[in-house]
Image (spheres, rainbow, N blue to C red):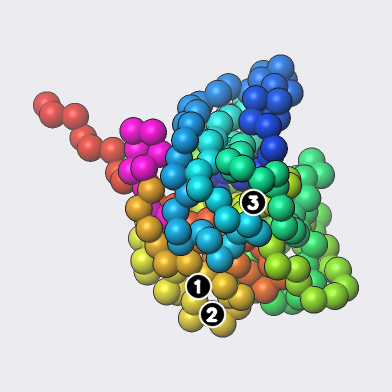
Amino acid sequence: MIVGVAQIVVNVGDLDQAAAPYLADGWQETFQVREIPNHDAKASLQATPRRALEMVHLTPREGTAVELTCYEGAPPAGDTVYELAGHVRVHAGQLERSQAFWAALGFSPRADGLLEVRAMLPGWRLSLELVGSDGVPPATSVDADGMVLVTVLTTAIEAELERLRRTGLLLRFTPWWTEQIGTRTVEVAIVEGPSGELVELLQAPRRAKRDE
């Protein structure tokens, strides 16, 4: 089950430089992690080989968190169909199929035409706009310059990945894998929608109850 959007992911060439405007605008640095090994499962979704990355997670006063990533080695490469324009904009070369893809992720249309995932917590909500575009969907990559991923939270990543695969809407998908992010262990997979939109599935372990 998808319960909301954890964050959007923006890939950059310089992590500190990219984080500075957010921090100046009052965003809080939730955590940062350096020298994260690049998992082999992502290789098919990257424009060039990568060995490691670093990240900074930033939280606004209101709205969706942003994770900035920076891959070691070559500068950002490849394409993305995402654009940040006050909200998330998707340039959809396969508009009708992309509408079905986002519906499968729990997004529904609002009166103003934007799509929105309505989650229990305000910070897990996200609005996005699908804009039709001509041409064949580009070969998008998680190491491109700019916004590259929407991260959705799921309670059961293996079942969610299989459900999305059965829709017939995915261009590509990875197997799920376990990632160590600082002190947290999470389960991750990435799927690619019909217009090249990359979405990260994230299952975080439930917090253990404190002993009475």
Place of residue 175 in the rendered image (x, y in percent of width and height, measured from the top left):
42, 67
Q: Are marks 3 and 2 in contact (CB under 8 Å)?
A: no
Image check: 31 left or right of 26? Answer: left
Q: Are marks 1 and 2 in contact (CB under 8 Å)?
A: yes
Residue denoted by label 1:
164
Q: Nearer the viewer, residue 118 or 167?
A: 167
Q: Which mark is residue 6?
A: none
Q: Which residues are magenta?
A: 180-188
Residue 121 lies within the magenta run = no
Can the viewer see residue 99?
Answer: no
**Could you tell me how far apart the alpha carbons at marks 1 and 2 are, in whole angstroms?**
5 Å
**Could you tell me how far apart the alpha carbons at marks 1 and 3 are, in whole angstroms?**
23 Å
Residue denoted by label 3:
143
**Quadrant of the drawing holding the C terminus:** top left
**Could you tell me how far apart the alpha carbons at marks 3 and 2 are, in whole angstroms?**
26 Å
> Please, what is the dominant secondary structure of the magenta stretch?
strand
Q: Quadrant of residue 29?
A: top right
Residue 183 lies within the magenta run = yes
Tell me the element at label 1.
Answer: helix
